[in-house]
Amino acid sequence: MQRRSRGINTGLILLFSQIFRVGINNIPPVTLATLALNIWLFLNPLKPLYNSCISVERCYQQKDWQRLLLSPVHHADDWHLYFNMVSMLWKGVNLERRLGSKWFAYIIATFSLLTGVVYLLLQFVFAEFMNEPDYRRNCAVGFSGVLFALKVLNNHYCPGGFVNILGFPVPNRFACWAELVAIHFFTPGSSFSGHLAGILVGLMYTQGPLKKMMETCAGMFSSNIDYPGQQYYFNSSGYSGYQDHYPYSRPGSYEQAPRNYDVYTAGLSEEEQLDRALRASLWDRAHASHPGQENQKDLKHMTGM
């Protein structure tokens, strides 16, 4: 395994600057490990891209199933890596803090595998119904399918508010679909099927049987994985509330109540939401060690980012 011969990787440099700007100590462990794995395999790929990408022809027809594991963690270039990992940084800080590190790691592993499987099914269906054999040969790499699935989860847990897509405010619940179309038309070379596969996997978790199946499998193989508390949102006289439910009456899965900005993003960009999530983490850490007082030094540092 040899290191890729490259020039200056501007995207990689910017990615490191974002990570150190946030602060390694402020990034949850599974999110940090995911970033590290993708960066390491970008610099030291296990195989060349044409032997790592996923397609119906290579995986199904040639039985090269290891591509299901390789394709999500390999990227075409430094900018591909940068945009995917910056998105992972924000989503990981939010979701891992909400769901817990063990369950979030379980989700990352499951989604990484399932997005590849769903991608193959979509490409096969498109090839059959459109009578276009190129769909069987189209080969894709990258983590963006998993990111679309995580975006569905994040929008499920934070259902209110709007996001700005190409200058237009879009409700959070439709943001994934709007981004799917926007990226397809304005980013040449992106994988429509890969992104769609991620959305479908996310919906399988939030609206379908996937979450229950994962809980069942986790219960069979380990009793150490904490099940995530399910959030129920409701409105009463203009007040937005929620309550925690413990699957299988497991009080160990208690989750601290989110603040209002965790429920409504108010149209903030991902970077602004990342700053808020990090400030919330520092606030909780400060109050855990000094109840009733704020860690002014940490908050000031985060505000200046």
Image: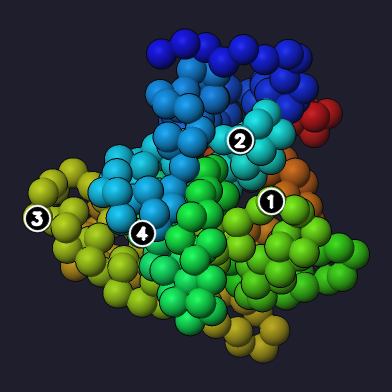
Q: Which mark is residue 189?
A: 1
* Residue 285 image-quadrant placement: top right
Q: Which mark is residue 117?
A: 4
Mark 1 or 4, nearer chain start = 4
The answer to whether the residue labelled 3 contacts the one labelled 1, judged by CB atoms less than 8 Å apart, is no
Q: Please state which amino acid type lies under the numbered disc 3.
A: Met
Mark 4 or 3, nearer chain start = 4
**Secondary structure found at label 4:** helix
Q: Please state which amino acid type lies under the numbered disc 4.
A: Val
Instruction: Tell me how far mark 2 sits from mark 3, CA to CA.
Output: 38 Å
Assess disc 2: are there few (<14), some (14-19) or many (≥20) residues with their C-alpha within 10 Å of its C-alpha: few
Q: Quadrant of the C terminus?
A: top right
Image x and y of residue 62, in percent: 29, 49
**Secondary structure found at label 2:** loop
27 lies above or below 253: above
The answer to whether the residue labelled 1 contacts the one labelled 2, judged by CB atoms less than 8 Å apart, is yes
Q: Residue at x 75, y 14 (%)?
A: 8
Q: Nearer the viewer, residue 127 or 274?
A: 127
Residue assigned mark 2: 76
Mark 3 or 1, nearer chain start = 1
Q: Please state which amino acid type lies under the numbered disc 2.
A: Ala
Image x and y of residue 137, in percent: 48, 55
